[in-house]
Each structure stands twice: as structure tokens, then as C-alpha cells.
Image: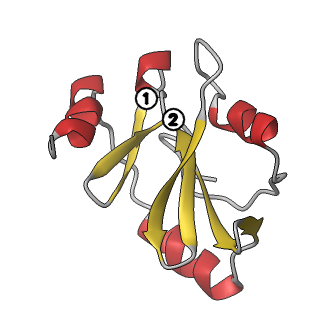
Amino acid sequence: MVKPGEKPCVVALVDNGDYLNAMVSVGATLMCSAAVLPIEKNVVAIYAWDGVMAGLKGNRKVGKRIIAGTFYVVRVVDGQLRSLTEDEISRLSYRFRTIREYGDTEVMDSWFDDL
């Protein structure tokens, strides 16, 4: 789990759409929709697709995109969520360790720059 303003930590998730929607909506003004953003082969970020519109703070960059709100880094195998390996946990925790602050405009611009 990668929360805005905090270091990454390991949590358990349930592979259920309603549950994931609730988990990415923590701190939001309304229920958000969970979406997937590829990080690397078989590893994705599950994040609030509409997070910035729901009042969530800019968090970390994944590629060119800034994710708003809490997101979860998971392994996906045959369309199913799986736990990260110990090596992946270590490597990805290190990758997302740096806390940054992004404004709403920066978050939105990161998603619309390619249009």
C-alpha cells in the first residue's frame, strides 16, 4: 500500500471489485472506481481512477502519470491478483519510498499530456 505522505507498507487485499473500490476510496469525498495501471510485467498499481475528482491528494508517479490517493501494488497472473514476491516487495518499496507532494493541476495534467 502506498499512501500519500507515507512510506509504502505491506497489506492484504481481497480480489473483489467492490472491496477494491472501497480500498482506493479511503479519504475520498465519494466512492471511487478502482483501475489498473501497469508498472512492469505482471505488476500493476490498483488506484482510484477518479481520485483527483473525489478530493484525493496527489501521491506518486507511475511512468508519466501521477496517482491521486492511496494505491496498491500487486502481481497479476492470469487476470487474478497475487502477492508480490519478497524481492518485488523490497524493490518496489524502495522505488516508491520518496514522498512527494503534487497539486490537483499537476495530477490532472499528467493524465492529459498525451492528448
Say left or right for 66 vs 31: left
Identify the residue at horizontal 58%, vertical 12% (top origin). 29
Specify whether 73 is left or right of 98: right
For badge 1, the amino acid type reads: Lys
Residue 3 relative to residue 79: left or right: left
Q: Look at the picture and state if 97 lies above or below 107.
A: below
Q: Are marks 1 and 2 in contact (CB under 8 Å)?
A: yes
Residue receiving disc 1: 57
The structure residue drawn at horizontal position 58% and vertical position 20%, both measured from the top left corner, is 28
For disc 1, the neighbor class at 10 Å (few under 14, some 14 to 19, many from 20) is: many
Mark on residue 69? 2
Above/below status of 26 relative to 82: above
84 is higher (above) or lower (below) than 29: below
Q: Position of residue 47 (x, y in %)?
A: 55, 44
Residue 57 found in image quarter: top left
Query: What's the distance in space between the residues labelled 1 and 2, CA to CA?
Result: 5 Å
Secondary structure at badge 2 equals loop
Amino acid type, residue under disc 2 in the picture: Gly
